[in-house]
Image (cartoon, grey):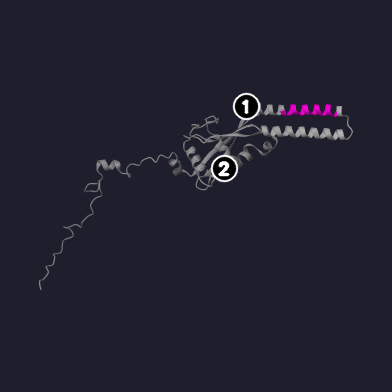
Amino acid sequence: MASRKSRPPSDDGDSPSPRAPPPPGRDQRGRYSDDEYYRSPKKKRRHSGRGYDLGREKSPRVDLLFCVFEGAPSHRWRTAPYSFDRRKINDVELWEDIRAIYRHELQKPWRRIFGFTKLKHIIPIEYTPNSVPIPKGDAQSNPNSHSFMHAYHHPDRLRPEHEWVDWFVDFKAQDRGKTVGLEFQQGLWAEKLGLIAVLITIAIIVASIVWSLKGGDLQTVFTVMGFVLTLAAAEVALVGLYFQVTQSN
């Protein structure tokens, strides 16, 4: 039986253990070549193209400032701040908050009940160093006014997603250090004014009929009620003209 020749033990100090070959693009010492160095994703990152990536990495909160212009006699901007966490809110909750802020802080309940103005437009704005709001961005890139108004009046019809949340995050990320927000533009509430005029007319007609049935002279009834109707119509027209002029100025 042939004897197997044993291998002489190798000296660890003289024969190093085998090494794994370097990855492609590196030399024997494991360093990048000049071309691969600049192509490596670890050495140079490509911009993702999303305008608000940097903002999201810095802070998940988005700070906005809403405003509405008050006509005569104050002629000033009423503002209300709003801040939300993009990780903890969806489109429905976002617009419910915006609607509540406008109705309770900017419009005030008594103005909504007794006034003749209502919300007409919502536009994105940024503030100048003098705190004057001006329209922000390109009108073609921003959602149109109908989209804003639909979301404001019908937040319950929105899907609980993050399309509006992402838009506001992107909107804030492009602020260039300026304060941004939304302006709520008001106008004459013609429907309410017309309804009041109709109710006054119906009340005068009913009063005239009742007066006539109770024995009143028809000529006197129609004379008095005609005067009252004319006076009421003039007052309604003056109120509408007043609100229209103050809002336009």
Q: Most extreme residue toward the left, as rendered?
A: 2
Q: Quadrant of the C terminus?
A: top right
Residue at image mark 2 = 95
Near mark 1 (Cα within 10 A), the count class, few <14, some 14-19 or many ≥20, is: few
Image position of 55 (left or right of 75): left
Residue 18 appears left or right of 149: left
Side (left or right) of 130 relative to 5: right
Q: Which of 168 and 213 is in front in this view?
A: 213
Residue 120 in view, yes or no: yes
Residue shown at 30% from the left, 42% from the top: 39
The crowd level at tag 2 (other Cα within 10 Å; few <14, some 14-19, many 20+) is many
Marker disc for residue 104: none
Residue with the mark numbered 1: 248
Quadrant containing the N terminus in the rendered view: bottom left
The overriding secondary structure of the stretch rendered in magenta is helix
Asked if the magenta segment contains residue 223, the reply would be yes
Q: Where is residue 82 drawn, in percent x and y?
A: 56, 40
Q: Position of residue 220 (x, y in %)?
A: 86, 27
Residue 54 part of the magenta segment: no
Decide which of tag 1 and tag 2 comes sooner along the chain.
2
* Residue closest to the eye, 91 or 108: 91
Dot 2 amino acid type: Trp
Q: In 3D space, how far apart are the residues under numbered discs 1 and 2 (Cα atoms)?
A: 27 Å
Is label 1 in a helix, a strand or a loop? helix
In-image side of 77 versus 225 (left or right): left
* Camera sees residue 65: no
**Going 77% across and 26% down the picture, which residue do you hit?**
230
Q: Tell me where the magenta segment starts and ends, as one range.
A: 220-236
